[in-house]
Amino acid sequence: MGDGLTLAQALFAPRAVALIGASGDARKNTARPQRYLAKHGYAGRIYPINALRAEVLGTPAFKSVRDVPGEIDHAFIMVEDVEQALEDCGAKRVPVASIYSNGFADAGDFDRQTRLVERARALGVRLLGPNSMGVVDLPGHVALTVNAVLEMDAPPAGGTSLVSQSGTMLGTLLSRGAARGLGYAKLVSVGNEADLGVGEIVDLLVDDADTRVIALFLETVRDAQRLAHAARKAHAAGKPIVAYKLGRSALGESLARSHTGALAGTDVALDAFFRDCGIVRVDMLETLVEIPPLLAGRAPSRPGRAPRVAVVTTTGGGAASVVDRLGLHGIELASMNDLTMTATQNTYRDTLQSLLDSPACDGVLAAVGSSAQFHPELAVQPILSVRASKPMAAFLTPHAERSLALLAEKGIAAFRTPEACADAFAAFFAWRAPREIGARSAIRSVEALGIPMAQQAIATAPDFAHSIPYPVAVKRLDVEHKTEVGGVVLNVEDDAGVKEAARGMGRQRVLVQRMQRGLAEAIVGYRDDAVVGPIVLVGAGGTLAELYKDFAVALAPVTVEEAEEMIARVKGLAVIRGYRNLPRGDVKALARAVAAFSTLDGVAEAEINPLIVKEQGVVAVDVRVVWKA
Amino acid sequence: MGDGLTLAQALFAPRAVALIGASGDARKNTARPQRYLAKHGYAGRIYPINALRAEVLGTPAFKSVRDVPGEIDHAFIMVEDVEQALEDCGAKRVPVASIYSNGFADAGDFDRQTRLVERARALGVRLLGPNSMGVVDLPGHVALTVNAVLEMDAPPAGGTSLVSQSGTMLGTLLSRGAARGLGYAKLVSVGNEADLGVGEIVDLLVDDADTRVIALFLETVRDAQRLAHAARKAHAAGKPIVAYKLGRSALGESLARSHTGALAGTDVALDAFFRDCGIVRVDMLETLVEIPPLLAGRAPSRPGRAPRVAVVTTTGGGAASVVDRLGLHGIELASMNDLTMTATQNTYRDTLQSLLDSPACDGVLAAVGSSAQFHPELAVQPILSVRASKPMAAFLTPHAERSLALLAEKGIAAFRTPEACADAFAAFFAWRAPREIGARSAIRSVEALGIPMAQQAIATAPDFAHSIPYPVAVKRLDVEHKTEVGGVVLNVEDDAGVKEAARGMGRQRVLVQRMQRGLAEAIVGYRDDAVVGPIVLVGAGGTLAELYKDFAVALAPVTVEEAEEMIARVKGLAVIRGYRNLPRGDVKALARAVAAFSTLDGVAEAEINPLIVKEQGVVAVDVRVVWKA
């Protein structure tokens, strides 16, 4: 950019802004940026652009950006004729324009958006939006936004920066945090992400001195590669990223699609993406507000066993409401220290500190009862005075805003609800460092993967002769979901049986396959996902497992060791891991097959279903591959 | 009770209370009841009982209850020598004593508690506790409690009464409700429930004019029969009951056990109990505070298909966060009405009203954005002005206490978090009228149940002769979990095979059973649960289904129709319900088997595993029954 101005400076810390379409009616949305900039102490120059007025809300206005005497670092476009405004910005050499106006991909008009971006590139103008509510930098006193949350007086500044695909939710999160003393640094509404996307914004925030944690409110991911890169950079810089993403349910997913005009990825693919990129994923909205102090300054840890949380409490029922929930997440209780009868400031603090120093637990929960409401200073004092060398969270059972604020002020994670508290611990312990995704191999055929296939041959009328040893399975060749249409006959014992089976299917050609017996069936899948790229899946096989949606997904390719970790996450594959003294299956061979499958190249999607797992080795019974055109 | 005083009057509206062990040190817990009674405007007479002082906090005190000149309706016991205090109450003919003192079942001393109750019965004194924090009646200005939440000035009164097994959580819930204008009528901390239990208290509350909804905070259920009876009475009276129960996870369950000294029932049994008694169960703590207005005045409804919620919103992201969650609960979206661009007070209200009047949806959600924070009167006005003929809930995305209070004032359900909002809708739609539990049959043998059994015989060395048609299964006779110890050989084709199998097991006697083929395996279970009584279970069979804990449970006995509804709740049994064009199994025959099994009498526990479901009929392969001693 001109005169050494960085993108981050133009975006977050512009020395002069043009408000294109600024209204002189203070009640209108389009008057907000000007009002909010003033209200929150913006120190730069403000140029309202208004075709009909010489001044707007007391500030001299201009008919066009072109007429402004000085330089403009950042334009905020609120007019319908976005294209003309962009031309003016280009002529004026404005480096960044945030576009509040909509009617692009958000309204299904992808062509208009594509043309806009192309023209912006040509003009050298970076775009935020369209359909963006703008940018806020609280420590920097920049409130370049139409979001009504800025009506608030002096929202607290803090070390969390927020990137949101929903403009309104940006206000929601700021509002909820502010009510309890949890402040933000920068807040960015990315809108349609036509140019600047979540990934590039995160990249900028990693370099931002005020930002310690990056929080994302997502409906989908539009720039997975860029975000993955930024996430690795964030990890290296010790800045945790945490995401709340809509679309866990099929219903939510379809809604995200219609709302944003984006192709929503399936949630499972994105879940794998977050995990493999080292992005913490939270389940509940409020956790996104509350978790940052738990993450700040920390790195992912792996106890190598079920994580254990120790509890200090003066309210048995309150602590139990969190612990119950921790149990649902597979977290164990290291110890329950109920000090109801014995608590003094000192014993409470000493108990907390000794747990924080003990290797017997991986996290500590302090559950505080009614004193948090009526004697906040006393109630939270012991929690404020310890050295937290491991994740520590407070759960306050009553309505206790002052206690929440005291804890927030000192950077200690505090939770309003037992569910969000448990969600945060679960998200923390599920957090992994970004995984290195290996290079793609050049493997372009299933045979080359080295996965053993069941012996098979095609048998043809009239005699259906073949050389496969009995017993065999006879299968139709021309349909998917063979079982459901009577296209499979199992345990055929002789030639007569093969003929009879083929006749029953009314076929001239059938597949004859050696019957396979093993300890369990697995399914191995591969897909070049439109959102996150190649992913690999392993699950328990069979109809039941399909009903329970029991599988693990990772970005492809994976190593054999990574495949083993995936297998360990599949509940139904417990049957080959030694469950109830059942004979152990060849987990290593399954992992090798998953790893091999994950290196496929040039494939749109592929599936081995079932892959029979034996005591020694695995055998693929049915493989389906859709090669890319 | 004497002079026509009812138990409810003595408990909730005593004309005179004795505070046994009242402290003259205002900072002590034992001074609280006296302070709180005065602070909250108690109009009756207060008699502090203190062995060492002639007056306590300015009120004349007595050495013993026996010395009090007038009658006492309710004594609050805070001394260590509970037994002596009880004797005094008996001598004074005090009808009810609430006991704050602990050291009974709570501390593992069950004998002391049993003796106390026996003596109380003999003396004609009803007991609340021990280990109770007392009773509050907000409309009646009775704050007979040690719970610090009463430090609060003027907590709002409302139509919800709360019964809590955790004394501290009683304060938590009152505090959280009060912060947003949700008031309570009566609040009861039941402690150990040595005499008065949750069931009897609920019974009293059904008759209470101020109570419209009854909320329960539970760790277990100690008087299932009584509570079941009260729940039926509540249903008849149109007073919904809603419960939050700890112990969803195994970890939480073990904690509830150690904390309360009670035998915790397994959560699944209690879940069935709640459903069959018409008690709404919520999953999240805050839902217990927020749901009552959604339930008040309503009865359970059954759309007969997946329930549908229509949404009116001015914040797409906010609405989506609820809808996403609704989808996880199996609730469908009837319509999404995003009025962001077009909303006026009138269009908003009209849209809401037309949805409320439409048969196309079963519930309506109004999601409100930032206006709820900055213009509460305007933001919630349309919601306040409709006639809600079906469940309607508001979700406010920002921090918006004033809007929450306005909605609370008018009895409209409003939610702070998308998760609690969805939890409430899910709980509402899962709500059923109490089920009539039929009488026990006198069936005392499995054979008499009419469930077909696989043909079987015992074969003995040396020749292992039998008359079962081949193919057969050969099984060891002497072990459970036969499969896991190599105790089963399937698909044995001839006599030689039987001999070989028996030899392999090293047995002189084996079970020979005709091989059964069907479409699916089911498991049917029965247990006389220590907490809720006889229950019946149906689930998908096999190891995978066991891993996924996929079953439905109901109080026994069930009718065939009720058993069919249970089967419909089991995900894995989709394979016999026509999933993916798979052949349909005989669901009716399975239901008949479940219903028959549920009528067992004199049985501690029993299991059919597997029960083979065929296209026509079912066959039990293995039945295990533990008769009561």
Image (cartoon, coloured by chain):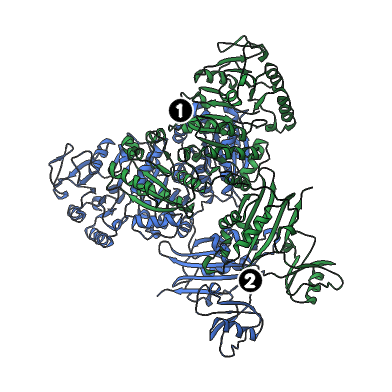
Chain colours: A green, B blue
Q: Is residue B604 left or right of residue B146?
A: right
> Where's residue A450, x and y in %?
71, 60
Q: Secondary structure at mark 1?
A: loop
**Mark number for residue B171?**
none
Q: Is residue B380 left or right of residue B143?
A: right
Read off the residue under disc 1: A156
| Amino acid on which disc 1 is placed | Pro
Read off the residue under disc 2: B617
> Where's residue A592, x and y in %?
64, 59
Report the front residue among B186 and B523. B523
Q: Secondary structure at mark 2?
A: loop
Res A57 seen here: yes
Q: Say if labels 1 and 2 share a chain.
A: no
Mark 1 vs mark 2, foreground winner is 1
- Taking the view exactly as shown, the residue that stands out farthest to the bottom is B462
Q: In terms of image quadrants, where is residue A382?
A: top left
Residue depicted at 71% across the width and 70% down the height:
A515
Above or below, comparing residue B479 to residue B582 in the picture: below
For label 2, the crowd category at 10 Å Cα-Cα, with few meaning under 14, some 14 to 19 and many 20 or more, is some
Above or below, comparing residue B406 to residue A506 in the picture: above
What chain does badge 1 belong to?
A
Report the front residue among A328 and B227. A328
> Where's residue A180, x and y in %?
43, 33
- Taking the view exactly as shown, the residue that stands out farthest to the right is A462
What chain does badge 2 belong to?
B
For label 1, the crowd category at 10 Å Cα-Cα, with few meaning under 14, some 14 to 19 and many 20 or more, is some
Res B163 seen here: no
Marks 1 and 2 in Cβ contact (< 8 Å): no
